[in-house]
Amino acid sequence: MKQNKQIKQMIFCFLTPAVLFFLLVFLYPVVRTIAMSFFYVEGVSDATSTWQFIGLENYTTLMKTAIFRESIKNMLKIWLWGGLITMSISMLFAVILTSGAKFKEFYKAVIYIPNIINAVAISTMWMTAIFNKRFGFLHNFFAFFGSNLATTDYMSGSIKFWTLLVAFCFGSVGYYMLILMSGIERIPADIYEAATIDGASKPAQFRRITLPLLTSVIKNCIVFWTVGVVGFFVWSQMWSAPLSSELTTITPFVYMYNITFGTTGNADRNAAMGAAVGVLMAITVLFVFFAVNRLIKDEDVEF
Amino acid sequence: MKKILALLLALVMVLSMAACGAKEKAPAATEAPKADAPAAEAPAADAGVELTYWSMWNSTEGQAKVIQEAADAYYAKTGIKINIEWKGRDVKKLIQPALDAGEKVDIFDTDYALICQTFSKYVVDVTDMAEAAGYPDHCLPVLMETAKGYCGGALKVIPYQPYTSGVWYNRDMFTAAGIEKAPETFAELLDVCQKLKDSGVNPFTCDQGDGTALLMGYQLARYLGQDGVLDLIDNVKWGEVPEAKKAAEDIYSLFEKGYMSPYAPSNYPDGQNELGFGESAMLLQASWVPNEVVQNTGAELNWGYFPWPAVEGGVDGIEGGMLGAQAFAVTEVSEHKQEAFDFLMTVVIGEFDQKMADAVSSAPADTDNTVWPNSVAGAEPYFKNMTKSYAWAVGLQNNADYMEFIQEAINQLCKMEITPDQFIAQLEALK
Amino acid sequence: MRRNKSSHLELKKQMRLLPGHIVVGLWCLFTIGMLAWIAAASLSTSPEIMRGKTLQFETGLHFENYVKAWTANNISVFFMNSLLYASTAMVGSLLVSAPAAYVLARFVFKGNSTIRSSFVMAMSLPQIMIVLPLFFLTTKMGLTGSKFVLILIYIGMQVPYTTIFLISFFNNLSRGYEEAAAIDGCPPMKTFWTIMMPLAQPGIVTVGIFNFMSIWNEYFLSLIFAASEKNMSVGPGLKSVLTAMQYTGDWGGLFAAVVIVFTPTLLLFICLSKTIINGITAGGVKG
């Protein structure tokens, strides 16, 4: 009995701080953001008494705003193409490195490096060392072969989006590769041995064993990726500098920042509109989260 | 393994302890300006007043160094301490929420038009203080007029570091190509371009973004004037105003005829650096750019300047130009408005104004300071004769609803990915 | 003989993996090359960089770029701030989350699954959803630009992820430890701190390092909540240096700043890469 009481006490003491943080940093803001999105609120710090209820107007206005639609389009492109690129490269590397290649530790470490470097630093590197059209790597590479691709401007127009995506994916690969590797290494080796004895080829083993047993890991990867893409901000800002945002690289997050805090030369701020963007993004993530759980069945339940 | 982990944990603990220590010190330093200045804080203080200034600069920038020096000098003289918070450009996003929440900020600065348009209700009218201090005798008249104009006639901002924009060129290349006179009309500009091209250099270059926006902005403004351009943008009249298409055709022709560098429009700052490397002769940009080019490329150029030329049948001629400036403002909530104003006077008048001009190659704001920095000296006569002032990029970057679309269309036009007709159609479609 | 045969086999195996080696090797070469170029550029001058002569060092090595970046460009300040934020928030989030994760993993009680699923939801919640009210709160309390607020927010932001991560970790520990401790009369709380925490160390280290890294690389919250130069972390700090550098045109100094920002984490990573990487792997291992 005493033991029981102590445990109750412990549950209370141990949970309280975490739950308090949760209430303060997540629940309260979420409730307020949702509420705010139905009002007209000019500044973020305006008192609640100055809010004017306007129903769904923020949302309908957003849907009609061309630049917001454009930002959603960009985000979806990043999610889909970036996701495919990142996940397939990560998977490829994970498979290569778990198949007994030498120097595995070295490779893993180097591939992970971009993750430990600040995004501002790493994007500066990309924009100068690689994509600069006068002295960047790609320029020199193509110039070496005398190709007229050497004059391509990687930092402008529609190609800018793709350079951004390449740089972003390059940095993401390491993280997802490690997650996938840990998943693959968890699969008991004897399953593969049995498959090899049965004469299954490596690709067949990958399709029949590795992929199915990795579903829960992959599901997590998709959710993490979605959260990452919705939070796409600093890369977009770096790629638009010195302007604050650009058509080809704007994302909803950047748009929210602009609309909430205002941009140069434009006095209109609308914090509630920013809140509405936030709500829409949260719905997007939740949608993906549930869709992924619904569509992909766990097969590696417990083993 | 265990040992490494234990070491790591220990390291983390030590770090966090050290960090906590640092943290405890830091707020103390931050609080100081807010507390009502204990006498011990300011040794030479007669008043012991402290002012808080939220700056748009980063402390490493030339402007910041001059302002810091002025603040130190002011403290030495009066005992009034200026606590400067280097907020950087984002001050314009932060200042309003902060003031709404009652933060004690006495002075802040940002673009002068922006202060009037957005922060007008937070800042004080300093007209009377300015009269008393004899400030109107010092401030460049056109600057003063524009500043007042933005704020509906009242002086609510104290402008400094004025800048303009126009075509900066390499005089030696002009001489080598046998060009004696800077062009005054667009037709003459095309002539000049042809001569330069014949002499074997790229006549023109630009960077996309601000660079291309300025090209299109100026050409539109020459046809329509500032108000006409704003009307065009805000009411999406691209299809109805024939001059819009003419301007697009003009700019397109510069690229089509090969008057632009093969790299143009480049990615900032590659295009402007072409001047420094002696590859291109002309660049349309703001007046801080020559200095950047010199610093980036180490070039010693013989700089020339002319304002963007006039067009046939246009509303404006070379008397119109962008007149920009940063400006200080004293907040409504400040308890020491006069002291704040006095400090600002020391920054924008006399010695420190000249230092500011020299440090960042801008025009002096005080008419008593007559020495313009070398690289921008060519703009001086035009600057003083300017009668019509344009907003930055003539307002092309002002409309939050679709400025990104305009910018993208301009970039595509300059890259000759779309024709002027498509350019107009693309923007008209945004209606 | 036997040794020869096995090394022969090994060689054959690696030959079979050659395409894999080439792909991964090129990728690594590219990463290292980029870092090396930045390091070279940080010792160059602007005109050299702009003319594509970065690697020729015609005017010698410009180590003064580093001095300039560290002192004049305030990198030292941003650096110390980031260190403060990342280390305190990391420790804080662990102290808050580990006990919570433990009881969530171990005990059945009302609300357990509600808390878990709320945390999972919170993990996936975009920052943009919560940042406005938090900003409102801090401005209302006049705490904008306070380091303390930012640390608290960072801790709060990490709590759900850390807790969920550690739940699976505590799940995998054998219940035998607690049973033995209970028989010895050790109170449950003490059991946790003295027995279970140390057992979960690999997981705690891993998630701690992840938290450290993510706070170190965090940009948006720092931009909003630590908007003054003296409070800025390396992300926005470097961006401000970048802005300033573009106007002053000192590219060598900018690259030196970039190098300074990444060198410490890089060194840390090189020293601890095994722990970090094994940690990630260990995090998923059952039992």
Image: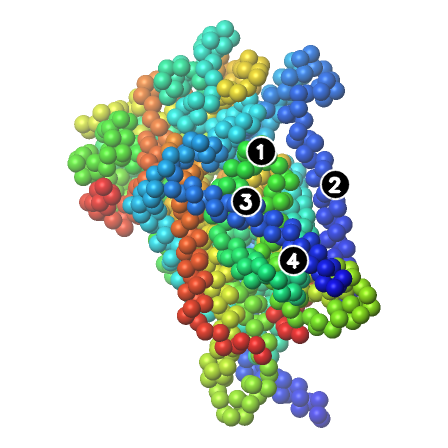
In the rendered structure, are the residues bearing label 4 and label 1 in contact, judged by CB atoms less than 8 Å apart?
Answer: no
Task: Kindly identify which residue carries mark 3.
Answer: C221
Packing grade of label 4 (10 A; few <14, some 14-19, many >=20) is many
Q: CA distance from mark 3 to mark 2?
A: 23 Å
The tag on residue C141 is: 1
Image coordinates for residue B100, horizontal then vertical, percent: 49, 28
Out of B165 and C40, give the one closest to the viewer. B165
Q: Residue at x 72, y 40 (%)?
A: B22
Could you tell me if residue C253 is visible in this image?
A: no
Residue type marked 2: Gly
- Element type at marker 4? helix
Q: Residue at x 53, y 20 (%)?
A: B333
Q: Quadrant of residue A192?
A: bottom right
Q: CA distance from mark 3 to mark 1?
A: 17 Å
Residue type marked 4: Ala
Check the residue under mark 1 and report the chain it is in. C
Q: CA distance from mark 2 to mark 1?
A: 23 Å
Residue type marked 1: Met
Image height of B420 relative to B326, above or below: below
- Element type at marker 2? helix
Image coordinates for residue B280, horizontal then vertical, percent: 38, 40
Q: CA distance from mark 4 to mark 1?
A: 29 Å
Image coordinates for residue A25, horizontal then vertical, percent: 56, 47
Task: Kindly identify which residue carries mark 2.
Answer: B21
- Element type at marker 3? helix
Q: CA distance from mark 3 to mark 4?
A: 25 Å
Q: How is the image coloured?
A: rainbow
Image height of A80 relative to B88, above or below: below
In the rendered structure, are the residues bearing label 3 and label 1 in contact, judged by CB atoms less than 8 Å apart?
Answer: no
